[in-house]
Image (cartoon, helix red, strand yellow):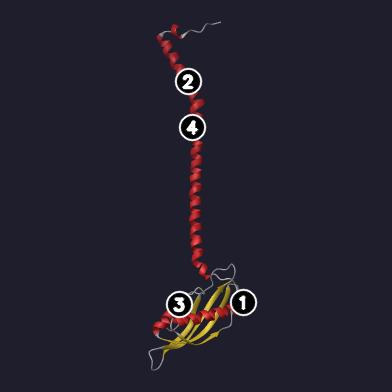
Amino acid sequence: MPQLLKIPELKPRERLLAIGAGLVVMVVLMDRLVLAPWVRHVQIVRREIRTMETALRSNQQLLARKDRVTSDLARYQRYLHPPIADDLQTAALLKEVEATASESHVSVGEITPLPVESDEAGTRYGFEVKFECTPEAWVEFLYRIEASPSLFEVARGGVSVKEGAAALEGTVRLVSAAMSSGVGSTAGESGGSHAAAGLP
């Protein structure tokens, strides 16, 4: 049986080679047993961190959307009303028109409710209003009525200068739209409604 040489018995060159070989074996063992598992663990941790960062960005976007939706809901909450019978809704709108005219210093001669129109989009309540006022009061009335939560629009109208006085008189048709459940806003666009009402 061959006898293994002890390191002190080796020649200097052989001893250097033996020590070098031993160091190489130790490095390989450390790489296999210590460094490789640690590197794999670091890679797994980095992947998990990237996944968490992606999920965090997604959650932040969802929270931002939630805040925006909540803000929009709060903004439009004043326009949302529970459905009520047509006669009660007509009476409520009639009262609102009278109150708006009074606040705007518009003298209302007569308010005539028009037939209620309903379709898949919603219900429209119309009113024919005879009035008398100053030009300034007329402008204020239009502004207030179109800013109403009842979604009024000026469908058409006509004004004329009252003889012998610096005042206007005429008739205007107002329409309020009530949305059906699950349907988007059906209020007609009010752009150009001032012109339709005969304003100069």
Q: Is residue 72 above or below residue 126?
A: above
Closer to the eye: label 4 or 1: 1
For mark 3, what is the residue? Answer: 144
For mark 2, what is the residue? Answer: 26
Mark 2 vs mark 1, CA separation in Å: 90 Å
Mark before the other along the chain sequence, 4 or 1: 4
Mark 2 vs mark 4, CA separation in Å: 18 Å
Do the CB atoms of the residues marked 2 and 4 lie less than 8 Å apart? no
27 vs 78, nearest the viewer: 78
Residue 31 drawn at (x, y percent)? 48, 26
Closer to the eye: label 3 or 4: 3
Q: Is residue 157 above or below residue 3?
A: below
Mark 3 vs mark 2, CA separation in Å: 88 Å
For mark 4, what is the residue? Answer: 39
Do the CB atoms of the residues marked 4 and 1 lie less than 8 Å apart? no
Mark 4 vs mark 1, CA separation in Å: 72 Å
Residue 72 drawn at (x, y percent)? 49, 63
Instruction: Report the residue at 49% width, 80% height from top.
Output: 99
Q: Secondary structure at mark 3?
A: helix
Q: Is residue 56 above or below residue 118?
A: above
